Image: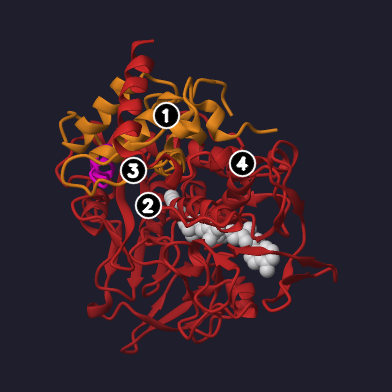
Amino acid sequence: MDSIKMNRRKLLKLLGAGGALAAAGPLASPAFAARTAGRVVGVGGGFGGATAAKYLKRLQPGLDVTLVEPAREFYTCPFSNLYLGGMRQMEQIVHGYDTLKNRYGIKVVHQYAEDVDGEAHTVRLANGETLPYDKLVLSPGIDIDFEGLEGYDEAAAEKLPHAWKAGDQTRLLRSQLEAMDDGGTFILSAPDNPFRCPPGPYERVSQIAHYFSQHKPRSKILLLDAKDAFSKQGLFMDGWREVYGDMIEWVGLSDDGRVVRVDADSRELESEFGEIHRGDVVNVVPPQKAGAIAHRAGVTNGSGWVPVKPHTFESQQVDDIYVVGDATIAAPMPKSGFCANAQARVTAAAIVAELNGQDPLDPVWTNTCYSVIAPEYGISVAGVYRVIDGEIREVEGSGGVSPRDADAAFRRREAEYAVQWYNAIVQDTWETRGLQKTLT
Amino acid sequence: MTRIMPRHVIGLSAAALLLFGGQAMAEEPISYEQASLLASTCFACHGTDGRKEGNFAPIAGRPYESLNAQLIAFRNDQVPGTTVMNRLAAGYSEAELEAIALYLSGITDRRRD
Ligand SMILES: Cc1cc2nc3c(=O)[nH]c(=O)nc-3n(C[C@H](O)[C@H](O)[C@H](O)COP(=O)(O)OP(=O)(O)OC[C@H]3O[C@@H](n4cnc5c(N)ncnc54)[C@H](O)[C@@H]3O)c2cc1C
């Protein structure tokens, strides 16, 4: 009671002092709610697209929102490494669209979007249907750049999985790990920046080390890297040594870690200076680019990714097309599910503001990427981002990684928080339930 | 159907959620929409409107004073044993944390989404 009174008093004082009531248009939200005008189409029902659709409906329930996604069920990349490590089942990382349909009134169309006509404002689906839009949100995630690494094409990926989109590829990699003899060598080849989930390859080898330490303790892990530095490097290396001894060997760019050619049949990787590494199981995390529909829509540039206007994530190249998630150039924000979700919320608000003739809000985005090195060993990197001098920047003094000298209780807590985060973000994105509370 | 955000704010019309930046920050008013956008940065870990319950401290509908004090303490790195909230709260001004606390304190319906 007290707090409400106090807030009221405080707010009235502030309102009196500023008199900015009318200028700020504070009654806009209820007004938006009643309006119906506006058709928004979203392409991609992953972290960015599902969140955008939900928040558009939350902000303006009268909007006509259609979400286009071929899959009826979405497997999250987050926690797919835990499946590889044996800490999760695939059934625990799959999410559907029922609540978004039934409670939010989003039309979910299970089709692949083949083309976008930015002039005509239409999206063409694989079944031939055409969807008109006033605003289009693309969140197609990544495509593997099969031109980017010699010898690595779609057929090669059936032998040397990337498992960088969760689902069948992840199952394939797990089955290869299960079939491998104790004492074998697992090789992961990590790409240069930018790529989906900067800590992902390093969490993956941690999880595979967890699996090996329990079932195949004589096995080795070789991580060949096209970079000399990686996300949470010190923390990962401490953790690997502490938990897995010398099972994991990391070879960076300067030590000839960059893989330039692969031979899928012999499971051989060739480095820049001609060294050949043969693995019993080989996981190629290949170069990547924005999902195909972004290229079709004409929103990508020469880099293969999408330049966006920082305040709204509207394309710099085509009006009324907004792009969020991994497909965008949003550095220093990483290509994470957390950021895709954050960008989608800001962009949904920007679209609603624009449809109602208002200025966009001041964006703020956050990120927290947990990596689970072992069941009781989690680490994190966090960041807060804003538009500063017309660019996306990390707020000075915020963010950063878990302390290097933290104790075991701290690491255990971060592993628990990883699960809590997973449960929360899947609720916020698909309105689905997460996992049980603990990891083991 | 979902309820729209303004109805969660107890006893306050959306109009009343105007705050002014304190201290060194520009004296810009924080509108209801801006407050809800700021607060939405909590949702990826605490669930939509902060309603998710679990290991993290529940935040939806907690009294304004305690939320605000906690956020400011995180910002000043004065909470022993903190893992990530100090790193995150450091990215906001005090006025913004006040706006976030006000928004979250107004979430009266504790029903889980
Ligand atoms: C191993 C691994 C671990 C990860 N762990 C984490 C983590 O712990 N935390 C974290 O925050 N992030 C993590 N990530 C990153 C995260 O998965 C991505 O950043 C996130 O999925 C990006 O969201 P998005 O919406 O851009 O793309 P996605 O989530 O991939 O969604 C894209 C969707 O678009 C659909 N689509 C594509 N093209 C079309 C089309 N033409 N028509 C219709 N639909 C289409 C696809 O089917 C897909 O469902 C991890 C990634 C990997 C690989």
Residue found farthest to the top: A1
Mark yes or no: residue A435 visible. yes
Q: Decide whether residue A62 is among the magenta residues.
A: no
- Residue found at x 43% / y 69%: A195
Badge number at residue B29: 3
Q: Tell me which corner region of the image, top left, top right, bottom left or bottom right, holds residue A142.
A: bottom right
Q: Amino acid at mark 4?
A: Ala
Q: Which element carries disc 4, helix, strand or loop?
A: helix
Do dots 2 and 3 share one subunit? Answer: no
Badge number at residue A364: 2
Badge number at residue B30: none
Q: Relative to B102, is A182 above or below?
A: below
Range shown magenta: B85-93
Q: Tell me whether the residue at label 4 lies in contact with that at label 1, contact meaning CB atoms closer than 8 angstroms.
A: no
Image depth: mark 2 or mark 4 in front? 4
The colour applied to the residues of chain B in this rendering is orange
Q: Tell me which corner region of the image, top left, top right, bottom left or bottom right, holds residue A253.
A: bottom left
Question: How far, Cα to Cα, is label 2 from label 4?
Answer: 24 Å
> What residue is disc 1 on?
B104
Question: How far, Cα to Cα, is label 2 from label 3?
Answer: 16 Å
Colour-to-chain, red:
A
Image depth: mark 4 or mark 1 in front? 4
- Residue found at x 14% / y 43%: A405
Chain letter of the residue beneath label 1 in the structure image:
B
Please state, as top left, top right, bottom left or bottom right, where the C terminus of chain A lies in the image: top left
Image location of residue A273, percent across then percent down? 31, 89
Q: Seen in the image, is A158 located left or right of residue A105?
A: left
Q: Amino acid at mark 3?
A: Pro
Q: Nearer the viewer, residue A21 or B42?
A: A21
